[in-house]
Each structure stands twice: as C-alpha cells, then as structure tokens.
Amino acid sequence: MRSYYDRGALVPDEVAIQLILDRLAQPDAARGALLDGFPRTLEQARALDAALAEQGKALDRVLFINVSTDELLKRLSGRWVCRRCQAPYHAVLSPPKVPGRCDLCGGELYQRPDDTPETVRKRIDVYFSQTAPLIEYYRRQGKLVEVNGEQPVEQVRHDALAALAAGRK
C-alpha cells in the first residue's frame, strides 16, 4: 500500500477491496462497519458487491449526504489551516478573530492547494462524472438513504444515525 502512495499512484481496485474485506473480517467489525470514500466508481461498487457476495455478505445501506454544488464550493473553498499548529478555520463558518492569523498560536493561515476554488470545482466535476452514478446504482438496489446535508451539523448527524439504524437487521 505504501509503495502506491510513495509513487503518487492510486491503489488498484482489487487491492483496495481486499483491504476492505480483510478489515471487515476483524472482530470489531462483526456488528457492522461504515465505509467512507469507497467505492467511488460504478466499477468499484460492482467489484465490492461481487466480493462481498462471495462471502455471503452485502451492503445494507448506502448513506448519501446530499449537499448542493454551491454549498460544497462555499464549504470546501473556504477552508484555511494554521501553518504552525494546524488549527482549522473557515472564511465564513468559523473565521479567525484576526484575518490571516491563528487564534490559538498567532501562526499564519494558509489554504491547502486542494481547497482552492479552482481545485474544488475540479473535484466536484470528477465527483459528478465518476461518483454520482453510484446514487442511482444503489437507489435501484433499494439501499440508498438520503440525508439533507445542508441542515445544521447536529441534525445531519441525527438523521444519518437514524437512517443507518433503520437498516440494521
């Protein structure tokens, strides 16, 4: 796994799926687990479904926290981090008391390259081309549960937990 990261390469799907299967086989995952960020493509979803089916398992629910493109742009491109202590800030949602300075240590705030508006737009474009098709894929299987991600954080948390609990067998 490390060799892929060191080369800046994506981990092949079959390696990622085997890692997931190995992790799901651990005792602490016996009652269930939550996957975050995988699968990202239809090919990965189909391969994961097939691998789980070979073990007599299947995904129970797929949680879709629905947030509009405009809101995603606002949230993601507004993130800033302190160079010194890594404290997170947001230009709109949690701005520092002094612009450009960390409230905790006085360090300089910077925006990570993957949080610039241009990069965020590219990430959203990739999402719509590669990941959004999973919504319909899982909806057709009756596994998709949707939560309004534009509500207050505690309400999103409540709704997400309720949706996942409803899927427990």
Image (spheres, grey):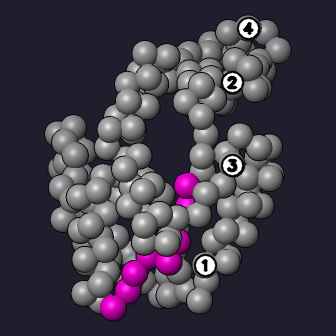
Check residue 93 for magenta coloring.
no
Residue with the mark numbered 4:
99
Give SS at disc 2. Answer: strand
Label 1 with label 2: CB-CB less than 8 Å: no
Of the residues tagged 4 and 3, which is closer to the observer?
3
Residue with the mark numbered 2:
90
**The quarter of the displayed image where residue 89 is located:** top right
Query: x%, y% of residue 63?
Result: 56, 61
Label 4 – label 2 distance at C-alpha: 11 Å
Residue with the mark numbered 1:
167
Q: Is residue 17 visible?
A: no
**What segment is highlighted magenta in the picture?**
56-64
User: Image point 68% across, 9% down: which residue?
Assistant: 100
Q: Earlier in the sequence, mark 3 or mark 1?
A: 3
Label 1 – label 2 distance at C-alpha: 34 Å
Q: Amino acid at mark 1?
A: Gly
